[in-house]
Structure formats: structure tokens, C-alpha cells
Image (tube, rainbow, N blue to C red):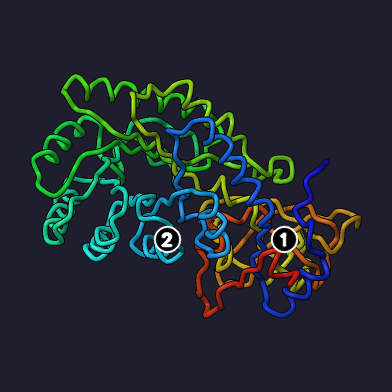
């Protein structure tokens, strides 16, 4: 049976909400629940695998409740995310904290909470964590983020694992960093952290990552260095072109790559930081047509949502599968779908085929559950979009 993203809600319900509040995010919580169940099934078969949800993808409280109930940990990249995770009831022992520019205030917040691990990205950061941990009379657990020089074959703005960029340490700097860590009083080396990029669809990339981790482990062991945990990051992509064909990513194939290729030592734990693949398909941005503008060579569909609600097309050139759910069955026309923001980059798609559309039709941008609501802004003094789950709509 074909997947129906709108099961449980009607076009009329979505249209009514859109008329009352403007563009908004709709979350299909049933799909998120099924996605989390698929992950739990994989983890149940491999107890030393642990998933930390990358909260930067979407920090909506209603979604975080389901993530917490599924037993996942949290991957944070700011003190605010650490605080949100704690407020939502996540155990500090399941929180890992990455990020290239952790402030003293953010580090103190995490230290005082007793989080599981800091993913450290530079020697100066390690020294600051040590100093702050000494002041608080605690010991911080550290994993070093390593750039394994593995090409993720993805967009240049979301590739992070090449030899040298602002993230992480070069491989040749790793052993000296661990040696220094072992000399410091208030920090403890526990693991390695990797993250090579996002929206990765070629699973052979992860096989290459496993091979590189295996090499690094042998080098560390030759120096007498024991590693408790391996964090392989996240980055698993989703099907933006056909969201109803693959509403849940193939987690079995994803985890199998690591089961088959990563040489795990006795007692060693493996951590994953999945974000997009968990929440992207459960979310959609719902908007409406303001005007159909007929040009000399093209037609413009002007909608009431813009890059203030969904910035991915303007920032990354991303394309979201787009539907006119008010005009199903109408003859097809082609439009440049644009928003109201006073910037030429406020374009969702060009020459995009849709049913012939008119003012008031409901336009839905799919696969927007990751890096959508969480990246919204108030530019042009616009209000942040409201959010609704299936349960909230049917109350």
C-alpha cells in the first residue's frame, strides 16, 4: 500500500489553519514513531550501538518527546541545545556535546549537568575544558573529533571530513593530542569522533570511513592507547525527490555497513548521531498561493512562505518535493515558485510542474522536518512559523 503522508488530516483542516496563522509546519507524528521503531529494532540486535539524535535538525518539543520515549540520546552542538535536552528530560548520560566554538558558559553548563562526553575539536578547546573542569572539581570525558580525509560526495557546504577545515583535528595531530590529554588533570580521553558530512546516500562512503577508523585504531594501539568508544557521526541522507516512496530510510543497510566493516574491540561502544534521517520526512511546510503572476516567458507562483520559513533552497540550492493539494487532477503547468521576502534568492524552485494553481491553493513543501523550523528567522520582521502535529490538529 502506498504511503499517505496526509492520513489523519484533511486538506480542509490544513487550509483552515493556514488561513488563520499563515505558513506553518505540519508534523506527521505517526511517521516519526514508525521511524524511531525501525531504529530501535536495529539497536536491539546490536547492544553496543547507540544513537544520539542530532537535535540541531529539529528541536520541536513534541518531536523531542517521541525521541526521548524511544530511548535515544542527544547530540548537541551548543549550550542551548544541551539546555533544551535537559529541559525535555533527556538523561545527561546520553548527551554528547560537539561544536568547534564552545564558549566558557556553554562548557560550564555541560560540566555542571554531567554530560556523557565532549567531542573536542582543537587543543585550545581541550585546555579550556580542563581549566573549567578543575574549577568545578569534576572530570570531563573527551572524544577527539578527527578529520579522516574521507570525501562524503555531498554538497560542499555540508562536507566536513576532509583533511583540513574548521572542524576537528588532522589525523597526524591525534596522538600528540591524546598524549597531552593524558597529562592534564581534569580531562579523560575516552574516544574518537568522526563526522564526514550530511545527506549521504552512497553507503560506500561509510565503508571507507570504517576502513579509515580501523587504520587509526591500529596506530593508536601501537602507541599503547586504548579507546573506549567510537562515534561515527551521522549524515545518512533521505529521498527528497520521492518522499512517499521512501518515508523511512533503510536503517538496516546503514547499520549493516558498520557491523560488517568496523573492527570493534571487546567492550567498545559505537555511537551514531542521526538527525535528518530521523525527522526530515515527518515534517512539511504548509503554505498558500498569494498570487499567480504571468510573465512573458514564465509564470510565477508567489506563496506566503519564504526563506524565513525554509532556508534550505536559498542556502544550499536544495529542492523539496512540492505539492498543490488543493488542485489534484488539474492540468499541469510550470511555475517559478517564489516567496515574499525582499531578496532575489527567495526562490523554492524554477520551472516546477504543478497542477494549474490559483490564489488560495495549499502548497506543501515536503521533507522539511530537518533544518526547516529550526532554521527559521524573523527577517523582514516576519513572525516565526507555528507548528502543528496530527494530534494537535484533531483535538
For mark 1, give the secondary structure. Answer: strand
Of residues 23 and 313, the one drawn nearer to the viewer in this rendering: 23
Quadrant in the picture for the N terminus: top right
- Tell me if mark 2 has few (under 14), some (14-19) or many (20+) residues whose alpha carbon lies within 10 angstroms of its own: many
Compared with 329, 41 (above or below) is above
Q: Give the image quarter of residue 343.
A: bottom right
Q: Which residue is at 63% across, 72% downward?
A: 340
Of residues 193 and 86, the one drawn nearer to the viewer in this rendering: 86
Q: Nearer the viewer, mark 2 or mark 1?
A: 2
Give percent across and percent down for residue 27: 65, 60
Compared with 138, 289 (above or below) is below
Q: How much space separates mark 2 and mark 1, taking CA atoms?
A: 29 Å
Residue under label 1: 364
Left or right side of 347 for 210: left
Give percent across and percent down for residue 32: 63, 52
| Mark seen at residue 156 | none
For mark 2, give the secondary structure. Answer: helix
- Tell me if mark 1 has few (under 14), some (14-19) or many (20+) residues whose alpha carbon lies within 10 angstroms of its own: many
Quadrant in the picture for the C terminus: bottom right
Residue under label 2: 85
The mark nearer the N terminus, 2 or 1, is 2
Q: Which residue is at 24% across, 44% downward?
A: 142
Left or right side of 68 for 364: right
Of residues 194 and 7, the one drawn nearer to the viewer in this rendering: 7
Q: Which residue is at 91% across, 57% downward?
A: 330
Give percent across and percent down for residue 278: 57, 47
Left or right side of 285 for 109: left
Amino acid at each position: 500500500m502506498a504511503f499517505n503522508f496526509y492520513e489523519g488530516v484533511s486538506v480542509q483542516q490544513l487550509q483552515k489553519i493556514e488561513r488563520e496563522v499563515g505558513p506553518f509546519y505540519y508534523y506527521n507524528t505517526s511517521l516519526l514513531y514508525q521511524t524511531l521503531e525501525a531504529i530501535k529494532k536495529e539497536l536491539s540486535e546490536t547492544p553496543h550501538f547507540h544513537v544520539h539524535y542530532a537535535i540541531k535538525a529539529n528541536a520541536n518539543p513534541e518531536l523531542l518527546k517521541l525521541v526521548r520515549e524511544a530511548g535515544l540520546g542527544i547530540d548537541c552542538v551548543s549550550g542551548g541545545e544541551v539546555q533544551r535536552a535537559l529541559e525535555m528530560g533527556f538523561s545527561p548520560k546520553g548527551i554528547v556535546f560537539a561544536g568547534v566554538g564552545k564558549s566558557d558558559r556553554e562548557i560550564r553548563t555541560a560540566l555542571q549537568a554531567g554530560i556523557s562526553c565532549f567531542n573536542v575539536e582543537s587543543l585550545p578547546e581541550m585546555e579550556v575544558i580542563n581549566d573549567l573542569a578543575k574549577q568545578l572539581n569534576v572530570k570531563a570525558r573527551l572524544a577527539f573529533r578527527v578529520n579522516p580525509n574521507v570525501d562524503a560526495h555531498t554538497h560542499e557546504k555540508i562536507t566536513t571530513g576532509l583533511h583540513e577545515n574548521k572542524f576537528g583535528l588532522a589525523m597526524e595531530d591525534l596522538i600528540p593530542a591524546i598524549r597531552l590529554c593524558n597529562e592534564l588533570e581534569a580531562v579523560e580521553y575516552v574516544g574518537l569522533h568522526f563526522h564526514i558530512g550530511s545527506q549521504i546516500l552512497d553507503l560506500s562512503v561509510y565503508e571507507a570511513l570504517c576502513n579509515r577508523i580501523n587504520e587509526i585504531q591500529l596506530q593508536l594501539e601501537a602507541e599503547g592507547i586504548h579507546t573506549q568508544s567510537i562515534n561515527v557521526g551521522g549524515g545518512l541522507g533521505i529521498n527528497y525527490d520521492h518522499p512517499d516512496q521512501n518515508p523511512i530510510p533503510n536503517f538496516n543497510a546503514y547499520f549493516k555497513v558498520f557491523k560488517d566493516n568496523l573492527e570493534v574491540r571487546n567492550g567498545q561502544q559505537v555511537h551514531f548521531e542521526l538527525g535528518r534521517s530521523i525527522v526530515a520526512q515527518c515534517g512539511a511546510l504548509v503554505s498558500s498561493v498569494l498570487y499567480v503572476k504571468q510573465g512573458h516567458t514564465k509564470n510565477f507562483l508567489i506563496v506566503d512562505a519564504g526563506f524565513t520559513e525554509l532556508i534550505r533552497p536559498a542556502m544550499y540550492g536544495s529542492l523539496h518535493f512540492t505539492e498543490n493539494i488543493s488542485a489534484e487532477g488539474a492540468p499541469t503547468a510550470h511555475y517559478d515558485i517564489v516567496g515574499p521576502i525582499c531578496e532575489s534568492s527567495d526562490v523554492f524552485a524554477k520551472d516546477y510542474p504543478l497542477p494549474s494553481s490559483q490564489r488560495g491553493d495549499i502548497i506543501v513543501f515536503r521533507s522539511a522536518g530537518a533544518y526547516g523550523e529550526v532554521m527559521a528567522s524573523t527577517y523582514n520582521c516576519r513572525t516565526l512559523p507555528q507548528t502543528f502535529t496530527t494530534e494537535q490538529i484533531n483535538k
